[in-house]
Amino acid sequence: MDLNQRIGQRVKQLRDAAGLSLESLAEASGVSRSNISLIERGQSSPTAVVLDKLSGALGITVFSLFEPADTPPAPPSPLLRVQDQPLWQDPATGYVRRNVSPTVGAPLQLVDVLFPAGQRIAYDEVARPALVRQQVWMIDGCMDVRVGDTPWRLQPGDCLAMTLDRAIVFHNPGPGTARYLVALVTLPATARKASA
């Protein structure tokens, strides 16, 4: 099974588990019903922006869309070998993400990102039922990151913490590919109320 089919099965599984129709998910995410249908059938290669909108409406992180839809017969392993880590390329920007973390139910999710020179991606503000905190740690190159109205320039070794509750823009202004690690933690909805 290719990764687009895996993502599609996972979106459908999560939509069904939430009791959402295609129309309801389309309305909640801002992604068209026909596009969601194509994604669920594995006939579309969704962009990172579309995956972000869907994951936000489903109350999960993008990372979770790469998990298998079927329940494994045995408990998941605490070890995920590099050759088994899902690797996905955004068709719009060419950025490549590798989900590094095993799917053992731990709240921390790690993603290794390679972001091509000159590329930019803008994530809209997405209403998420849970509180999602993210840190971006630069490994190579540099990235301009705008969180809401605040711009940041990240150089190797820099680490930026943010909450996924506003629009975020990533841009690689450098001449080469930038590499960074994203760490995500999803906190219960009660944490969102406490931080408000």
Image (spheres, rainbow, N blue to C red):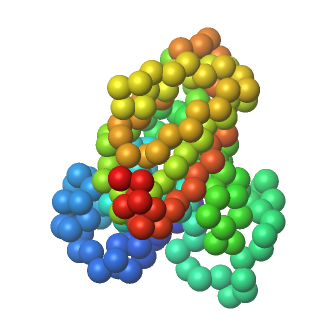
Q: Residue at x 56, y 38 (%)?
A: 161
Which residue sits furthest bottom?
73
Q: Is residue 180 above or below residue 14?
A: above
Q: How many marks?
A: 0
Q: Is residue 61 above or below residue 147?
A: below
Whether residue 174 sits left or right of residue 5 in the image: it is: right
Whether residue 188 sits left or right of residue 36 in the image: it is: right
Q: Residue at x 67, y 40 (%)?
A: 181
Q: Is residue 3 visible?
A: no
Closer to us: 156 or 174: 156
Residue 76 in percent (x, y) is at 72, 77
Q: Residue at x 51, y 22 (%)?
A: 152
Residue 193 in percent (x, y) is at 37, 61
Closer to us: 36 or 103: 103
Residue 33 in percent (x, y) is at 22, 61
Whether residue 37 sits left or right of residue 71 in the image: it is: left
Q: Residue at x 78, y 55 (%)?
A: 83
Quadrant of the image containing the N terminus: bottom right
Quadrant in which residue 21 is drawn: bottom left
Residue 126 in percent (x, y) is at 32, 49
Quadrant in which residue 101 is drawn: bottom right
Q: Is residue 120 above or below residue 185?
A: above
Q: Is residue 112 visible?
A: yes
